[in-house]
Image (cartoon, coloured by chain):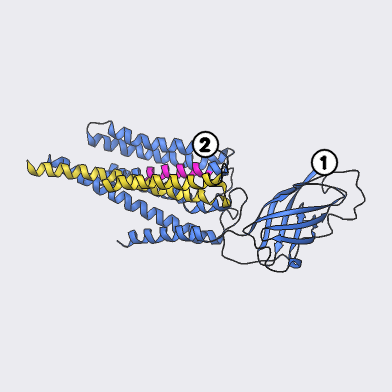
Chain colours: A blue, B yellow
């Protein structure tokens, strides 16, 4: 069947493209991460995936930015290696805000690497002893950035290369939704016109959906361990997902607890409808009402421009289709085994 | 079935080798956090692969049972 080959081709493409395409150059960290007002200080910038030695060092520009209007430009930029830069900044003698300190973002614009940003890179503390600096916060607007178009995935601090998990962890949930949706459609069909084939299809799709759910939860825990610090942090998204999977696990326990298969099938179909009705709130509505570490929480869509750019879409969507087709394939095999089981049982 | 047992075993060995070797080479440094945490992605792919393989092993067992059942039915 063509769609079976399609699933394999799409998944091979997703794994290869998902692993081979590089990340955009970014800034890993800076030293030191604090400075005082009214003084000149040297900042060492440590890049990730950067090629600072390419291109003339005089073309490299750097800013410490407070907001869209206030920034200070770096001077005397020295390239130490492909991943290390040294920049000097003249910090004005006042803070851009009315406080004791201000957090500044670092922006580096490189002719071949393009623009990279480190949020809250340097904390500037108010030093009343030095008021002699002539520098001003509004002297150096950020302009003439080097815009580089290349085929790469976005760079994000903390998650780094694990942004590639978007192609493997997230499609698990898309596949799960598809499996459970198909399953509930067959359950409704079964309730309208009871026939064993529809019941078996509902069972097969639920089981495959549960498989994807377990894989999604486990891969999520591995990712969480390295992105959030703990594999299980009782995050609302994790908790509600676990509840949803337990609701579906109960479907099989319910079916198995009936001696008459027909009764089990009918009640299973009814339960499946309730399980699906609880799935959407558990996975997508409740987690948005509470603070969560998971992207997509507190009202933001999970796939806003912050999390998924156009390059990623080229791999993300094929991967979803690939996993969904693989799921249908697995469910079909499960369905055929259930049918064979019936034939074997009838023979006895 | 022997093939699947072997595959399971190989996956386990692969996981152990992948995890342990660099650890030993670099002392106590967390190897999963090296090179931009790329091994977390490898781990995620391996989990998905292992999960699907384990499910296939289960389906295989079911089919073997059915085959036995059908064979016994014929002999009677």
Read off the chain for label 2.
A
Disc sitting over residue A100 in the figure: 1
Q: Looking at the image, which is closer to me, A90 or A316?
A: A90
Name the image quarter holding residue A54.
bottom right
Read off the chain for label 1.
A
Q: Residues within 10 Å of mark 1 (few under 14, many from 20)?
A: few
Q: Looking at the image, which is closer to me, A201 or A76?
A: A76
Residue B15 position within the rendered picture, expressed as x and y whole percent measured from the top left: 43, 46
- Above or below for A63 versus B52: below
Query: Residue at (27%, 35%) from the top-left corner?
Result: A264
Q: CA distance from mark 2 to mark 1?
A: 37 Å
Q: Work out which quarter of the rendered image holds the N terminus of chain A and state it.
A: bottom left
Query: Residue at (39%, 61%) from the top-left corner?
Result: A9
Q: Which stretch did the figure color magenta?
A: A208-223
Residue with the most extreme bottom position: A56
Q: Work out which quarter of the rendered image holds the C terminus of chain A and state it.
A: top left
User: For numbered disc 1, what is the local secondary structure?
Assistant: loop
Residue with the most extreme right position: A132
Query: Residue at (73%, 49%) from the top-left corner?
Result: A31
Residue A83 position within the rendered picture, expressed as x and y whole percent measured from the top left: 67, 58
Residue A78 position within the rendered picture, expressed as x and y whole percent measured from the top left: 76, 61
Q: How would you classify the magenta stretch by its main secondary structure? A: helix
The answer, for residue A314, to whether it is visible in the render is: yes
Q: Residues within 10 Å of mark 2 (few under 14, many from 20)?
A: some
User: For numbered disc 2, what is the local secondary structure?
Assistant: loop
Q: Looking at the image, which is closer to me, A59 or A325?
A: A59
Please indicate whether residue A251 sits to the left or right of residue A104 in the image.
left
Decide whether residue A216 is among the magenta residues. Answer: yes
The residue carrying mark 2 is A232
Please indicate whether residue A216 sits to the left or right of residue B76 in the image.
right
């Amino acid at each position: 069947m063509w769609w079976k080959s399609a699933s394999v081709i799409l998944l091979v493409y997703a794994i290869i493209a998902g692993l081979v395409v590089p990340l955009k150059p970014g800034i890993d960290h800076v030293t030191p991460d604090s400075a005082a007002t009214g003084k000149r200080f040297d900042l060492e910038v440590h890049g990730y995936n950067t090629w600072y030695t390419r291109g003339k060092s005089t073309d490299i520009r750097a800013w410490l930015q407070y907001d869209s209007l206030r920034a200070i430009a770096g001077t005397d930029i020295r390239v130490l290696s492909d991943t290390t830069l040294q920049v000097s900044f003249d910090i004005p003698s006042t803070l851009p805000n009315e406080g004791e300190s201000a957090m500044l973002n670092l922006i580096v614009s490189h002719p071949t690497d393009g623009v990279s940003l480190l949020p809250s890179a340097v904390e500037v503390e108010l030093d009343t002893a030095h008021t002699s600096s002539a520098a001003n916060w509004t002297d150096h607007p950020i302009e003439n950035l080097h815009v580089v178009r290349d085929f790469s995935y976005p760079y994000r601090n903390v998650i780094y290369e694990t942004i590639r998990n978007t192609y493997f962890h997230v499609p698990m949930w898309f596949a799960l939704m598809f499996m459970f949706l198909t399953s509930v459609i067959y359950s409704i069909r079964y309730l309208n016109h009871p026939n064993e084939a529809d019941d078996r299809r509902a069972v097969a799709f639920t089981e495959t959906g549960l498989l994807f759910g377990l894989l999604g939860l486990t891969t999520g825990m591995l990712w969480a361990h390295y992105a959030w610090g703990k594999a299980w942090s009782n995050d609302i998204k994790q908790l509600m997902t676990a509840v949803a999977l337990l609701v579906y696990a109960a479907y099989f326990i319910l079916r198995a607890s009936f001696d008459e298969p027909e009764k089990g099938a009918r009640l299973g179909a009814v339960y499946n409808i309730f399980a699906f009705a609880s799935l959407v709130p558990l996975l997508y509505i409740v987690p948005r009402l509470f603070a969560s570490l998971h992207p997509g929480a507190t009202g933001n869509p999970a796939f806003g421009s912050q999390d998924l750019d156009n390059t990623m879409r080229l791999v993300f969507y094929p991967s979803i289709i690939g996993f969904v087709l693989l799921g249908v394939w697995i469910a079909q095999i499960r369905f055929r085994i259930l049918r064979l089981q019936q034939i074997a049982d009838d023979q006895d | 079935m022997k093939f699947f047992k072997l595959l399971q075993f190989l996956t386990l060995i692969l996981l152990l080798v992948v995890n342990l070797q660099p650890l030993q080479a670099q002392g106590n440094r967390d190897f999963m956090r090296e090179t931009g945490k790329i091994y977390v992605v490898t781990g995620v792919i391996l989990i998905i692969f292992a999960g699907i393989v384990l499910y296939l092993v289960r389906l295989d067992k079911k089919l073997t049972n059915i085959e036995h059942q059908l064979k016994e039915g014929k002999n009677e």
